[in-house]
Amino acid sequence: MSKITKSSTAEYFAKNLQQVGFSSPLKAVLTTLKEGVDNSLDACEQAGILPDLEIEVTKVGTGSTKNTDLVKIVVEDNGPGIDPDDLAKVFGEYLASSKFGRGQCTRGQQGIGISAATTWAQMTNGRGVTVTSKTKGMRKALKAQIDVDIKSNHGLVRSKETIEWNKPHGTRVEFAMDGRIQLNGDGGLLTYIEGTVLVNPHLTINYKLAENDWVKIERVSNQSPDVPEATLPHPHTFKLGEFITHATLYGKVSVSKFLRSGFSRVSDQALQEMVKKHGLPKGLLDKALTGLSEDDYKKIFQAVQNTDLMAPSTRSVLTVGEESLSKSIQRLGETDFFAVVTRKPRICDFKPVVVEVALARFTSRNQDADSPVQLLRFANRVPLQFDKSGCAITWAIESVNWKSYGVQQPKDSLPLGPYVFAVSVTSPFIKFKNASKETIDASEELVQEIRLALIQAGQKLSRHIKREFKEADLERKLAHIEQFGPILVEKLAQLTGANEARRKKAEEGLKKILGRDSKDAIAELEEAEQRLAKQKAREARKSGEDDGGGGEDTVIYHGQVEDSAEAAGGTKKTTEKTTAKKAPPPPPPKSTVKGTEKTTGKKA
Amino acid sequence: MAGGLIRVRELKIDIPKEAKNLAERMLKDLENSKRPYLEAVKTSLDNSFYNSKVGYLTPGDKVVRTELNVSSVQKLARVVFMLEIMLRNLGIGAVNTKRELYYMCKGLIKGNARYKPLDFEDQNESDSIIDFIGDMMKVYREELNCFANDRGGQTYSNQLIVQETMPDGDRATVDLSTLGTAPFMPKNRPQSLKLKAKKKIDFALVIESEGTANTLHTMGFTKRNNCILIGAQGVPSNGVRGWCKLIQEELSVPMYFFGDLDAYTMQNIFRTLKAGSAASLIRNADFSAPDVKFLGVLPEDVKKYDLPHYKVKESDPAEARALKKARDVLENDPFFSDKKNKGLADILRWLIKEKVRCEQQAYFSVDPNDPIKTEKIILEKIKRGSYV
């Protein structure tokens, strides 16, 4: 029999870097950048600092492996800095995290990403990461190279030095690794930066990618998001194994104490119910955790699962907010129009979740009308850029009937057109399909919640599209009258052998009839415009005075969450609207009718 | 020659006169600033009726009314434009196919900038205008001197003699036994033909696949049997339907249909041959063969002859559509809900339940050592009365 050996966590990850986002040279660069930025933003938020980030991704030479370049990736922030004693842990040790399992809506969760980036740099270029860090209390900054000791899963600090740094505090990480730079497309660096900019309105970023010039994007919000306090997990989200592992963290306490302090929503009343209704022996509740057998655990676990518990609190989730999203979206380019929706926090699969959606049509981006919309997915404000087909967000988008909002859509696919669809899911317990956090697992409840947010945003968008459609319809109708009317009369006159006088009279009659039709079309257009104006006014009222920037064509939406509160009402609303549309339109103002008569007469 | 070349039936109306009246009414409406309208028979299943004594689908009272408005002005202009060409054809006794009319219109439209908006993007658009005119005036397309392109109806027989009256009045006689392995085709105006039999003809057999009809003929089927063998070539065209009707009426021979055992064959091919279709409601009287029997492939044949068959792939969109349609016709098609056709509806039900299909060519595999096994089975089935 071969000898059984034990390997360290670092060894495992070093051999399986593809599992954490390092499956190709392209992904390696993106993942490293992502991990650097995530850590910076999380740190800034936790310290209540408005983040100023400087990013540089450039090619500096040829890579050691085939078909790769040596790429330098720098992320510098104005965050609180890292305590010198923690540097080795943060960058050189796997699963060393301040956020693991804490139940907070932070970007990073496990403590794998940045150590994996260090490993990749070390494996492809022989050096780990160079970190410069300065905390508030330090006069000089500490600069060091940190490697991963793969055998022992420990960070090794090399060539440590103190340097002058004109920042009061902050961190700068610098990697040199084999990789390839891709700017655009689903997995592109620019796409990543755009996404990050969109969902972080409080971020100022200055970046240089490849040979391009430095670009600076200023923050549009001066409020650092308030990351809610950590929340305890809800017992209904646990499996038996997890439950037992969770118990080991609590040592020698009684079962009842463990249940009450280790989970949210387990009350004394719930404990009583477990005993009375679900057959949990009362003695077991007082027993110490250390004295429990596997069978005991199973009994307790089953009783907990069978007991009705209050849904978890939604206070632990954080939102970007409609107002901030509205401003932030303008940073991506000039919009034609857009709609944003922030849903109220909901419980999906016993986990609090907030879904936010921004749909926009940009005038300054060259997107094809026949190609699918550009989809930006976010989980805890981190852009997800790979494997979109399996993601809950994609499923939800595909399940919505976009045609009813005037957006083209092939069956069961993403809609088409020059739109950007940004969907953000925030939750302290997001379930990903893999460790590289590229896809949100699609549970029925979550897909439904995202779907409702999309439907609301779609309804807002449809007001604009409908107005455009009515305009085009009027044009088409006027053109029809002009083109076909005379042919119809001419041919009828020929078939009947009618004289010129009859032909003229018929032409007059035709003009009258079709003139009536075009009046109707004008009335419909006006009705659509009025509806849109009402919506604009309503939203302007709600958002207050501070967004006077929206010009004639740029409409800023700040629709209230409340107006979507009737969750399932989304579809119903549409039907009502459609019915309303079919009702005879109100008579158009006199002046317009006159104008049309003139136009029609002249054209026909 | 004016008045048409072929009389499909005794027509009670004078088409040019009717058309002129219609145009007159429309013009008058326009003069009075009233919306002119056109009405046509609604050609859909919900306006189809079936009576087994009549034997084909007949139209109900529903009409489609197209009233002039900004959206329909294009259609009305196109109808009047096409009507003028068709009336001219009728006036001089000229005949054109649908495709020819499409290209004629294109030429006229492109040649005159004012007509440009009428332009057809493809033939479907002009075909639907032609069909609408027929439905509107309740006349056959053929009575407007317009024919579809030929398809199907390849016929083989050693007994059949066909006499055709040519447009100039001359007569042509075709003895089908002299054609070797080549087929006779009735083209799309079978009504201009007269039929005679050299010897008593025992039966006529319509085969779904033209290739199979030719194979049977080549292997001597028509030599050994006093029969008429016809290839339908898929869904029977007007020509094939009119031809089968003519054979039935003139020779009064029993007629059988032999095709695949699947939902598509039953509801699209056989139903159309026997009772016409909803799309051609006003023509079914002269374009269907109500006495034709479904010889097979029958569900019982699959078992009896151990015919190779296979499961329908429901992931295949065409198959899924056919099955869905089968469920639909059982509910809504008056032909399948008629008691007289219970046997045929039962086959559809069996197909929906079993989700299998069996091709007509499966008979060739029954006995690999016997080249004429298919013929033997067909004859045996006719003799036994194994048909629906």
Image (tube, coloured by chain):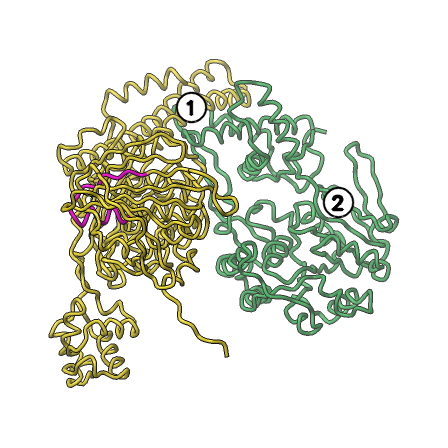
Where in the figure is residue A3, as x and y percent of width and height?
A: 46, 76
Where in the figure is residue A197, as x and y percent of width and height?
A: 28, 40
In which quarter of the view is residue A514 placed? top left
Q: Which chain is yellow?
A: A
Chain B's shade in the image?
A: green
Near-viewer residue (B114 or B239):
B114
At x 80% / y 34%, what residue is drawn? B169
Q: Which residues are magenta?
A: A38-55
Near-viewer residue (B193 or A151):
A151
Q: Which residue is mark 2?
A: B186
Q: Residue furthest right?
A: B178
- Look at the image and say whether residue B343 sits in the magenta stretch: no
Amino acid type assigned to the residue bearing label 2 in the image: Pro
Where in the figure is residue A132, as x and y percent of width and height?
A: 26, 44
Q: Residues within 10 Å of mark 1 (few under 14, many from 20)?
A: some
Chain letter of mark 1 equals A
Near-viewer residue (B291 or A89):
A89
Compared to residue A479, the image places residue B233 above or below, namely below
